[in-house]
Every structure is written in C-alpha cells, then in structure tokens.
Image (cartoon, grey):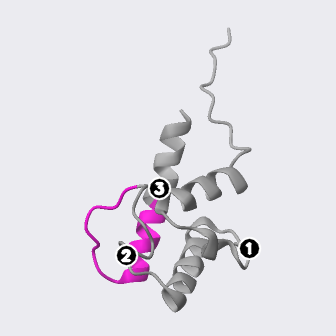
C-alpha cells in the first residue's frame, strides 16, 4: 500500500515539475535528475519549491530543495517528513 501512496505523491510532484517548467518534459520517473535531466537550477528550483508548497499545502525547510537530486528524493522526503502519519493500512472488516 505504501507504493500506492508514493505513486500519489509522485503524481503531484510531477505536476509541480510540469508547472515549473511550463513545458511538457519527456517521461518523468523517480530517477529523473533535477539538474542533469530537467535543467532545474537556481530560480527554477525556488519556483519548484513554491509550487510543491502550494500543491501539498506544506512549508518546506529553506534548504530542502537544494538537497534533492532526483524526483525520487522529493517523493521520499515528502512521504516521510509530511505524510508518515497517514494510515495506509487496509481497513479490517468488523462484525
């Protein structure tokens, strides 16, 4: 079930990237590199951070976006830092 949750987070991160680039990037994956594959540097990274904060309704630490190398890094960070308390266990039937 955690992979389904990570997939949900990845979809929102992908949306943020697309909005930041204002262009449709080629196929995105968890291993897509921010600098080498997407050319996200400096101000573009700041725009991505703002977009992520708006989409997820969170506040990122000031240096968080600089530590990310791949989209998977962002997904892992968001999943752990902000959503680790989300109950993803299936509900059991009660009689």
Q: Is residue 84 magenta?
A: no
Q: Residue at x 62, y 51 (%)?
A: 79
Q: Residue at x 37, y 75 (%)?
A: 38
Q: Does label 3 or label 1 sit earlier along the sequence?
A: 3
Mark 2 and mark 1 in contact (Cβ < 8 Å)?
A: no
Q: Is residue 29 left or right of residue 45?
A: left
The residue range painted magenta reads 12-29
Q: Does label 1 or label 2 sit earlier along the sequence?
A: 2
Q: Position of residue 64 (x, y in %)?
A: 67, 72
Q: Is residue 30 left or right of residue 57?
A: left
Relative to 4, does residue 68 appear above or below in the rendering? Answer: below
Q: Residue at x 74, y 44 (%)?
A: 85
Disc 2: CA contacts within 10 A as few (<14), some (14-19) or many (>=20): some
Secondary structure of residue under mark 2: loop
Q: Which mark is residue 61?
A: 1
Find disc 3 in the rendering and name its residue. Answer: 10
User: Viewer-proximal residue, 62 or 70?
Assistant: 70
Q: Is residue 21 magenta?
A: yes
Disc 3: CA contacts within 10 A as few (<14), some (14-19) or many (>=20): many
Find disc 2 in the rendering and name its residue. Answer: 38
Q: CA distance from mark 2 to mark 3?
A: 16 Å
Q: Residue at x 53, y 89 (%)?
A: 42
Q: Quadrant of residue 67?
A: bottom right
Q: Which quadrant holds the C terminus?
A: top right
Q: Position of residue 31 (x, y in %)?
A: 41, 57
């Amino acid at each position: 079930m955690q992979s389904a949750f990570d997939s949900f987070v990845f979809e929102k991160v992908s949306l943020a990237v697309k909005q930041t680039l204002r262009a449709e990037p080629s196929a995105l994956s968890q291993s897509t590199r921010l600098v080498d594959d997407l050319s996200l540097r400096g101000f573009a990274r700041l725009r991505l951070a703002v977009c992520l904060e708006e989409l997820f309704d969170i506040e990122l630490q000031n240096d968080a976006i600089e530590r990310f190398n791949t989209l998977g890094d962002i997904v892992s960070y968001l999943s752990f830092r902000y959503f680790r308390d989300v109950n993803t266990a299936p509900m059991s039937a009660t009689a």
